[in-house]
């Protein structure tokens, strides 16, 4: 196994009808896109890993956040999400790779490339992408596999960090270096890699020009 799909923060509190107004994602469109991605990666024999953002269930956190709290139904993976494996890891910070058990799993399975989808593109997805890059992984964000509710200035700042780190948006396995192996194995033709600036995501109010989602570079928040 060289490539793993990391599905980030696709949880009830961000996607179900009872979510807070700030999480105004287009649930139907995003879940349909992410489920398609999961099926494709699982079908190619790639590891699929699910990440939950967890906030400690303390009185102060219930007052300040009241979402993604440990032990609540809202913190569970979204009910409409395709579950292709039992590889599940929790995080308490934006970067999923702060979880030592996840790092050990990746090392054990020889994973060298991480392809990211889920929430939030300009929150936890960005934090995980940057964290993976610093740890020496090849990392890319999947075009159409994320969404954002970030304010424009915050989103632009996050995108600049991704650009500076050389992190790109790709169509999927066929848009990565792993495609060479797949092409030999399945005689598939590798399409041209899209430019990050033209890679749309599933936005809260329609397509986002890059492919985003909410904030999560803070310790207490998940998106």
Image: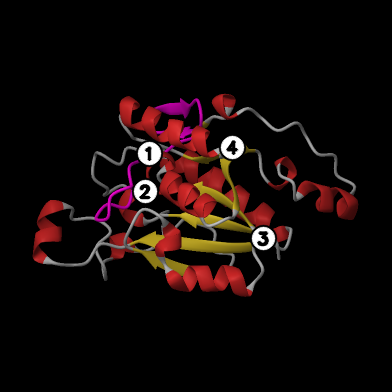
Question: Compared with residue 217, is residue 164 higher up or lower down, i.e. above or below?
Answer: above
The mark nearer the N terminus, 1 or 2, is 2
Element assignment for label 1: loop
The mark nearer the N terminus, 4 or 1, is 1
**Residue hosting label 4:** 168
Which residue occupies 32% across, 31% down? 154
**Residue hosting label 1:** 25
**Mark 4 neighbour class, 10 Å CA radius: few under 14, some 14 to 19, many 20 or more:** many
Q: CA distance from mark 3 to mark 2?
A: 23 Å
State the extent of the magenta-drawn residues as a range: 202-223
The mark nearer the N terminus, 4 or 2, is 2
Magenta span includes 22: no
In the foreground, 91 or 186: 91
Q: CA distance from mark 4 to mark 1?
A: 22 Å
Element assignment for label 2: helix
Which residue occupies 40% across, 55% down? 95
* Residue 141 point in image, percent of width and height: 56, 43
Which residue occupies 14% across, 67% down? 58
């Amino acid at each position: 196994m060289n490539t793993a799909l990391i599905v980030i923060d696709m949880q009830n509190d961000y996607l179900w009808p009872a979510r807070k107004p700030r999480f105004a994602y287009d649930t139907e469109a995003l879940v349909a896109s992410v489920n398609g991605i999961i099926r494709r990666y699982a079908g190619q024999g790639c590891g699929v890993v699910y990440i939950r953002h967890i906030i400690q269930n303390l009185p102060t956190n219930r007052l300040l956040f009241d979402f993604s709290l440990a032990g609540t139904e809202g913190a569970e993976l979204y009910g409409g999400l395709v579950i292709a494996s039992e590889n599940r890891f929790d995080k308490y910070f934006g970067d999923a790779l702060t979880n030592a058990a996840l790092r050990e799993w990746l090392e054990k399975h020889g994973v060298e490339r991480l392809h990211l989808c889920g929430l939030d593109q300009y929150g936890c997805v960005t934090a995980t992408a940057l964290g993976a890059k610093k740890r020496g992984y090849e990392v890319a964000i999947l075009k159409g596999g994320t969404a954002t509710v970030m304010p424009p200035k915050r989103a632009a700042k996050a995108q600049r960090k991704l650009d500076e780190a050389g992190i790109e948006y790709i169509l999927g396995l066929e848009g990565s270096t792993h495609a060479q192996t797949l092409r030999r194995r399945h005689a598939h033709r590798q399409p041209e890699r899209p430019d990050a600036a033209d890679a749309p995501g599933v936005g809260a109010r329609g397509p986002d020009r890059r492919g985003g989602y909410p904030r999560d570079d803070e310790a207490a928040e998940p998106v």
